[in-house]
Amino acid sequence: MRNSVDVHNHLVERDVRHELLRVPGRLRTAERLAAVLDLPPEQVGKIVVYEVDGSPVVAVVPSNETPDPERVAAALDAAEVRPVSPARASQLTDYIPEAIPPVALPAGFRVVMDRALAGHEVVYFSSGDPAAVLKLRGADLARATDAIVADLV
Protein backbone atom coordinates (compact mmCIF):
# COMPACT_ATOMS: atom_id res chain seq x y z
CA MET A 1 0.00 0.00 0.00
CA ARG A 2 1.08 3.52 -0.74
CA ASN A 3 1.15 6.21 1.96
CA SER A 4 2.03 9.83 2.72
CA VAL A 5 5.74 9.22 2.00
CA ASP A 6 4.80 8.44 -1.61
CA VAL A 7 2.75 11.66 -1.74
CA HIS A 8 5.63 13.70 -0.32
CA ASN A 9 8.18 12.18 -2.70
CA HIS A 10 5.89 12.72 -5.70
CA LEU A 11 5.51 16.41 -4.85
CA VAL A 12 9.22 16.91 -4.11
CA GLU A 13 10.10 15.37 -7.50
CA ARG A 14 7.82 17.95 -9.14
CA ASP A 15 9.16 20.83 -7.05
CA VAL A 16 5.73 21.48 -5.48
CA ARG A 17 5.75 23.29 -2.14
CA HIS A 18 3.57 21.47 0.37
CA GLU A 19 3.27 20.45 3.99
CA LEU A 20 2.24 17.20 5.62
CA LEU A 21 0.56 17.85 8.95
CA ARG A 22 0.18 15.12 11.57
CA VAL A 23 -3.17 15.00 13.35
CA PRO A 24 -4.35 13.04 16.37
CA GLY A 25 -6.50 10.06 15.52
CA ARG A 26 -7.74 9.01 12.11
CA LEU A 27 -9.48 11.37 9.74
CA ARG A 28 -11.84 9.08 7.86
CA THR A 29 -13.58 11.70 5.74
CA ALA A 30 -12.87 15.09 4.19
CA GLU A 31 -15.75 16.51 6.22
CA ARG A 32 -14.08 15.32 9.43
CA LEU A 33 -10.77 16.80 8.31
CA ALA A 34 -12.46 20.20 7.87
CA ALA A 35 -14.10 19.96 11.30
CA VAL A 36 -10.94 18.88 13.16
CA LEU A 37 -8.83 21.63 11.57
CA ASP A 38 -11.66 24.18 11.89
CA LEU A 39 -11.47 24.97 8.19
CA PRO A 40 -14.25 26.04 5.84
CA PRO A 41 -15.43 22.93 3.93
CA GLU A 42 -14.80 24.59 0.57
CA GLN A 43 -11.06 24.75 1.40
CA VAL A 44 -10.83 21.02 2.07
CA GLY A 45 -10.88 18.61 -0.85
CA LYS A 46 -12.72 15.35 -1.23
CA ILE A 47 -11.60 12.61 -3.62
CA VAL A 48 -14.17 10.55 -5.50
CA VAL A 49 -12.90 7.66 -7.62
CA TYR A 50 -14.64 6.75 -10.86
CA GLU A 51 -14.12 4.42 -13.76
CA VAL A 52 -14.64 6.53 -16.87
CA ASP A 53 -14.89 4.66 -20.15
CA GLY A 54 -12.98 1.86 -18.39
CA SER A 55 -10.12 4.05 -17.08
CA PRO A 56 -9.55 5.24 -13.50
CA VAL A 57 -10.29 8.88 -12.67
CA VAL A 58 -10.33 10.91 -9.47
CA ALA A 59 -12.68 13.84 -9.18
CA VAL A 60 -11.49 16.46 -6.70
CA VAL A 61 -14.23 18.63 -5.18
CA PRO A 62 -14.80 20.69 -2.01
CA SER A 63 -15.55 18.48 1.01
CA ASN A 64 -19.14 19.70 1.29
CA GLU A 65 -19.93 18.85 -2.35
CA THR A 66 -20.42 15.80 -4.54
CA PRO A 67 -19.23 15.72 -8.15
CA ASP A 68 -21.95 15.60 -10.77
CA PRO A 69 -21.17 12.53 -12.92
CA GLU A 70 -22.52 14.29 -16.02
CA ARG A 71 -20.10 17.18 -15.47
CA VAL A 72 -17.25 14.73 -14.90
CA ALA A 73 -18.15 13.04 -18.20
CA ALA A 74 -18.30 16.39 -19.99
CA ALA A 75 -14.90 17.47 -18.61
CA LEU A 76 -13.36 14.26 -19.92
CA ASP A 77 -15.43 14.02 -23.11
CA ALA A 78 -16.49 10.57 -21.90
CA ALA A 79 -19.52 8.38 -22.48
CA GLU A 80 -19.66 6.32 -19.28
CA VAL A 81 -18.87 7.45 -15.71
CA ARG A 82 -19.27 4.93 -12.89
CA PRO A 83 -18.45 5.61 -9.23
CA VAL A 84 -16.53 2.77 -7.62
CA SER A 85 -16.89 1.14 -4.21
CA PRO A 86 -14.37 1.93 -1.45
CA ALA A 87 -12.81 -1.52 -1.96
CA ARG A 88 -12.45 -0.92 -5.71
CA ALA A 89 -11.06 2.58 -5.07
CA SER A 90 -8.41 1.06 -2.81
CA GLN A 91 -7.59 -1.59 -5.39
CA LEU A 92 -7.21 1.01 -8.15
CA THR A 93 -5.23 3.59 -6.15
CA ASP A 94 -3.20 1.33 -3.84
CA TYR A 95 -4.19 3.57 -0.87
CA ILE A 96 -6.55 2.73 1.97
CA PRO A 97 -10.01 4.04 1.01
CA GLU A 98 -10.25 6.66 3.75
CA ALA A 99 -6.92 8.27 2.85
CA ILE A 100 -6.79 8.49 -0.96
CA PRO A 101 -4.82 11.63 -1.89
CA PRO A 102 -5.22 13.68 -5.07
CA VAL A 103 -1.58 13.07 -6.11
CA ALA A 104 0.89 10.17 -6.40
CA LEU A 105 -1.71 7.95 -7.99
CA PRO A 106 -0.76 4.97 -10.14
CA ALA A 107 0.02 5.45 -13.81
CA GLY A 108 -3.05 5.77 -15.96
CA PHE A 109 -5.11 7.82 -13.52
CA ARG A 110 -6.60 11.08 -14.74
CA VAL A 111 -7.56 13.90 -12.39
CA VAL A 112 -10.45 16.32 -12.80
CA MET A 113 -10.52 19.16 -10.31
CA ASP A 114 -13.35 21.49 -9.45
CA ARG A 115 -12.61 25.06 -10.48
CA ALA A 116 -13.45 26.37 -6.98
CA LEU A 117 -10.67 24.30 -5.37
CA ALA A 118 -8.12 25.15 -8.04
CA GLY A 119 -8.67 28.82 -7.26
CA HIS A 120 -7.98 28.58 -3.52
CA GLU A 121 -4.66 29.88 -2.28
CA VAL A 122 -4.37 26.94 0.15
CA VAL A 123 -6.23 23.62 0.11
CA TYR A 124 -6.15 20.58 2.37
CA PHE A 125 -6.51 16.90 1.49
CA SER A 126 -6.04 13.41 2.73
CA SER A 127 -2.38 12.58 2.36
CA GLY A 128 -2.36 8.82 1.86
CA ASP A 129 -2.23 8.37 5.64
CA PRO A 130 -5.39 8.77 7.78
CA ALA A 131 -3.37 10.54 10.50
CA ALA A 132 -1.82 13.17 8.22
CA VAL A 133 -3.10 16.04 6.10
CA LEU A 134 -1.67 17.41 2.86
CA LYS A 135 -1.57 21.22 2.57
CA LEU A 136 -0.69 22.96 -0.71
CA ARG A 137 -1.81 25.65 -3.14
CA GLY A 138 -4.76 24.82 -5.37
CA ALA A 139 -2.90 25.90 -8.51
CA ASP A 140 0.10 23.75 -7.54
CA LEU A 141 -2.14 20.73 -7.10
CA ALA A 142 -3.66 21.26 -10.54
CA ARG A 143 -0.17 21.53 -12.04
CA ALA A 144 1.25 18.52 -10.15
CA THR A 145 -1.58 16.28 -11.32
CA ASP A 146 -2.06 17.69 -14.83
CA ALA A 147 -5.67 18.07 -13.74
CA ILE A 148 -8.46 19.07 -16.02
CA VAL A 149 -10.03 22.00 -14.17
CA ALA A 150 -13.78 22.29 -14.65
CA ASP A 151 -17.05 23.02 -12.86
CA LEU A 152 -17.86 19.63 -11.34
CA VAL A 153 -20.62 20.46 -8.85
Image (tube, grey):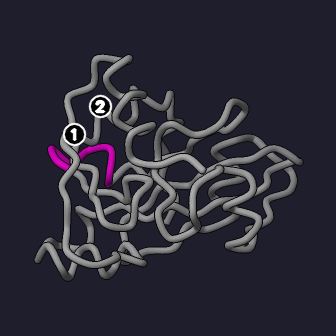
Q: Is residue 133 above or below residue 135?
A: below
Residue 142 pos. (x, y %): 40, 34
Q: Is residue 141 magenta?
A: no
Which image quarter: residue 15? top left
Residue 21 pos. (x, y %): 18, 54
> Magenta region's main secondary structure?
loop
Q: Residue at x 27, y 74 (%)?
A: 33
Residue in front for this viewpoint, 143 or 115: 143
* Label 2 environment density (alpha carbons within 10 Å; few <14, some 14–19, many ≥20): many
Q: Is residue 74 above or below residue 85?
A: above
- Describe residue 6's horizontal placement relative to residue 38 as left or right: right
* The magenta segment: 117-122
Residue in front for this viewpoint, 130 or 123: 130
- Describe residue 134's horizontal placement relative to residue 39 as left or right: right
* Label 1 environment density (alpha carbons within 10 Å; few <14, some 14–19, many ≥20): some
Residue underneath mark 2: 140
Q: Is residue 41 above or below residue 117?
A: below
Residue 104 pos. (x, y %): 50, 36
Q: Amino acid at mark 2?
A: Asp
Q: State how many labels appear.
A: 2
Q: Residue at x 80, y 65 (%)?
A: 82
What is the secondary structure assignment of the residue under circle 1?
loop
Q: Residue at x 73, y 68 (%)?
A: 83
Report the disc number at residue 137.
Answer: 1
Q: Amino acid at mark 1?
A: Arg
Residue 48 pos. (x, y %): 58, 63
User: Do the residues under discs 1 and 2 have CB atoms within 8 angstroms?
Assistant: yes
What is the secondary structure assignment of the residue under circle 2?
helix
Residue farthest to the left, as pictured: 38
Residue in front for this viewpoint, 11 or 82: 11
Which image quarter: residue 84? bottom right
- Describe residue 34's horizontal placement relative to residue 129 as left or right: left
